[in-house]
Amino acid sequence: MSTVFTNIDFNQQGKQVGFAHLPLSAHNDAWGTIAMPLAVIANGQGPTVLITGAIHGDEYEGPIIINELIRHLTAERVQGKLILLPCANTPALRASMRVSPVDNKNLARVFPGNPWGTPTEQIAAWIHDSIFPLCDFYIDLHSGGSSLFIDESAQVVVTDDLCPEVREKSEAMARAFAAKLTVVTNNMGDPRTSCGAAANLGIPAIAAEMGSNGSVSPLGVQRTRFAVERVLNHLGLIKTETQPAEPSLQVFIPAGGNLLSPGDGWFEPVMAIGDEVQAGDLAGWLHRLSEPEAVPLAVHFQVKGRVYSQRTFGATSQGNSLAVLVQNLSEKENS
């Protein structure tokens, strides 16, 4: 059950472009809605693939590429069905925020949602209960957002209940996507992401990180365009010549790989994305800039690995992620 309504017929062949609307009675609009752009491109028999963008509103490469597909992809080029949701979190996108300004919730941490909850929870419930059941595969396009510098990657989310066949198909999608890294992660044990929820429903899924720090990366846009094309070819939805890519390196986030700030202050990193570090290496200095006589606190890595992400903001609070390390999956599997 959902209060979301749309003029799109998911069973219709051809190309449809419209909106899904979530009723929202706000102070400045008593009978309004949250309007989410939505398109379906369908032709004949084949897989149904969902692509979402702007799950976080400060990540733009995904929406740019999804809107390109909406404008340029004809039904004749499709064998199956493509469901395109470029602005899943429209309020957050309009505000350039990771979370929705309507309820301060993160759409990527509320799945499976609640059809009678806050607006963000209702959007998650609509995707989970109404869209996911239509789908055979799922691609969720991210780009780090305002708070992160992050290495180009496709993430495969694993959970305790994940079917091995779903993981195998997800990893095959990630190989076809061919980002620099394929990151196998359980999101610190949090199953409430869109890809985690999809995988638990038996839908192979990947989440891509193709940009950084809340900007629009021209290279990220280009690489996302080619990567999405490669996956859609891999799944048999379209047939076209694709841009070749180097094989992706499979990695995972080890226990202790998320370096958390030990206190409040301003963090000065001494590492960069892609650097290889050892346990005990200096990660940076935590300054108390308003206390001139306070000696900066040295912050050290707890485990070895490669720097996958790094905080963009200088100011930090206790518990903020300063950096995340990854290790080669082959080392884990052979240990």
Image (tube, rainbow, N blue to C red):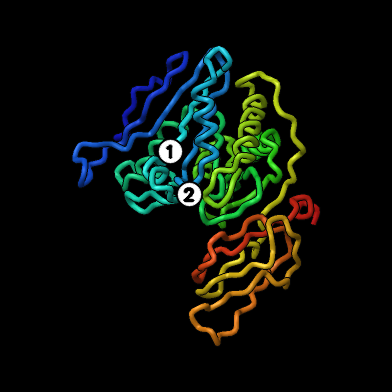
| Mark sitting on residue 211 | none
Residue at 59% x, 84% y is 295
Instruction: Answer few, some or many: residues within 10 Å of disc 1's Cα (few below 14, many 20 plus, some between 14 and 19).
Output: many
Give the structural element (helix, strand or loop) at label 1: loop
The residue labelled by disc 1 is 88
- Is any atom of residue 278 visible in this view? yes
Would residue 31 be found to the left or right of residue 136 on screen? left
Residue situated furthest right in the rendering: 334
First reached walking from the N terminus: tag 1 or tag 2: 1
Residue at x 47%, y 41% (from the top left corner): 54
Residue 192's disc number: 2
In the rendered view, tell whether residue 329 sits above or below residue 4: below
Mark 1 against mark 2, which lies toward the viewer?
A: 1
Counting from the top left corner in percent of width and height, residue 333 is at 76, 51
Q: Where is residue 158 in the image (x, y as percent from the top left)?
A: 60, 47
Q: Position of residue 264 (x, y in %)?
A: 50, 74
Residue at 57%, 18% (x, y): give it.
46
Looking at the rendering, in which quadrant would you find the C terminus? bottom right
- Residue 239 versus residue 178 in the image, above or below: above
Instruction: Residue 139: name its quadrant.
Output: top right
* Closest to the observer, 273 or 208: 273
Kind of residue at badge 2: Arg
